[in-house]
Amino acid sequence: MERVKIAVLVSGGGTNLQALIDAEAAGKIRNGALCAVISSNRDAYALKRAEAAGIPSYIVSKRDYPAKEEYDGALLRLLKEIGADLIVLAGFMVVLGPEVCRRFRNRIINVHPSLIPSFCGNGFYGLRVHEAALCCGVKVTGATVHFVDEVTDGGAIILQKAVEVKEDDTPESLQKRVMKEAEWELLPSAVSLFCEGRLRVEGRTVHIVGL
């Protein structure tokens, strides 16, 4: 069985990319291989992580493509050139257009730092998610890995994990704990399940084969 070629899209520090790199090195991404890292930001530290891991990296910057359709077109051409089978969004700060979503239907995975449908959608990213959770006084938050469709954070949910909110939490401390306890665990697991062919999508529901 040919291994699934994984392209990871990034914009910043790349902590979730590092979780994937570490998981692959430990043999935890079965039947999958990280084949490329694509960044929307020329200065993203994630590019250094890719270099250290020996993964080819590419830059597709929004500054170079004034129109959204042009950006999506450039991204699609690169993904075709790479031969990507699966796209993983790991802190990618660009909303993918409908054509990208259509071409890679049920082949784009994103990790979001909340228990969707809470604190998600347009405007909810990074520390904003954790600020909103603390503002609402929730006792439990977490992370979600889901397929990507045309609705921001609206695709079918693959995996979720809850994380306790502590009395003295700040957005920064909560962000770190959600990453450590949930995101870095869920994302490699979901990617491996995809690469093993164990995810079956029926409408809004994802069934995990073999559980």
Image (tube, rainbow, N blue to C red):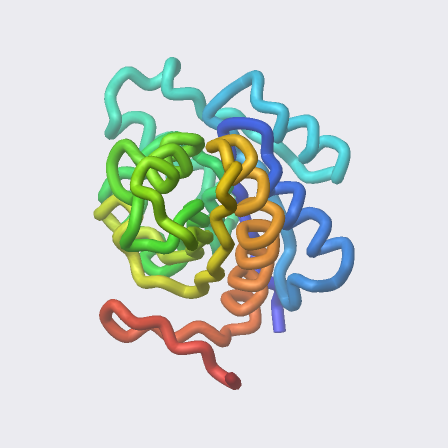
Residue at horizontal 26 percent and vertical 52 percent from the top? 154
Residue at horizontal 41 percent and vertical 65 percent from the top? 158
Residue at horizontal 76 percent and vertical 33 percent from the top? 52
The spot of residue 189 in percent (x, y) is: 57, 63
Residue 94 shows up from this direction: yes
The residue nearer to you, when weighing 159 against 62, is 159
Residue at horizontal 72 percent and vertical 50 percent from the top? 22
The single residue placed furthest to the front in the displayed view is 167
The residue nearer to you, when weighing 163 against 17, is 163
Quadrant location of residue 173? top right
Work out whether 87 lies above or below 203. Answer: above
Quadrant in which the N terminus appears: bottom right
Residue 109 shows up from this direction: no
User: In this image, 56 relative to 110: left or right?
Assistant: right
Work out whether 174 lies above or below 3. Answer: above
The spot of residue 63 in percent (x, y) is: 38, 14
Work out whether 146 lies above or below 211. Answer: above
The spot of residue 121 in percent (x, y) is: 26, 42
The spot of residue 72 in percent (x, y) is: 32, 33
The single residue placed furthest to the bottom in the displayed view is 210
The residue nearer to you, when weighing 163 against 116, is 163
